[in-house]
Image (tube, grey):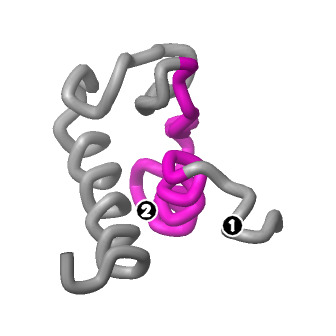
Amino acid sequence: DKPVATLSIVEQIDEILQVRLAGSPLAGRGIRLMQSPEGGAIVWVGLQKFAGVDEVTDPEVQAIIRAATAEWEKKYTPGM
């Protein structure tokens, strides 16, 4: 594991997402978040690439990514 300080926000959220995915029905779907060159998030679902969470067509995948994002916000931006 890399120290959290060296990870981008997207990478930090992806780490939370991977923990949430483990043992979930979505575990084998190849869901990952990557930093886009513009600073946003690219979502991979298997070989499908989406330009952000809003573009993802599967509502279950959207929901687990949003839950991971909310967990990150609680952990790293408390009180915001």
Q: In which quadrant of the rendered view does residue 61 lie?
A: top left
Q: Is residue 45 above or below residue 33?
A: above
The residue identified by callout 1 is 5
- Would residue 79 be found to the left or right of residue 46 on screen? left
Disc 2 + disc 1, Cβ < 8 Å: no
Q: Give me the residue at 56% from left, 32% from top.
A: 35
Residue 25: name its quadrant. bottom left
Q: Is residue 21 magenta?
A: yes
Please identify the quadrant where the C terminus is shown: bottom left
Residue range highlighted in magenta: 9-37
Residue placed most toward the observer, 30 or 73: 73
Amino acid type for the residue under numbered disc 2: Ser
Residue 66 coordinates in the image, percent (x, y) = 26, 53
SS under mark 1 = helix
Q: Which residue is mark 2?
A: 24
- In the rendering, at what x and y percent does residue 42 appear? 46, 26
* Secondary element type, mark 2: loop
- Report the amino acid beneath label 1: Ala
Q: Is residue 38 left or right of residue 80?
A: right
> Distance between the Cα atoms at labels 2 and 1?
28 Å
Q: Position of residue 40 (x, y in %)?
A: 42, 30
Determine the residue positioned at 22% across, 50% down: 63
Instruction: Identify the image quadrant of the N terminus.
Output: bottom right
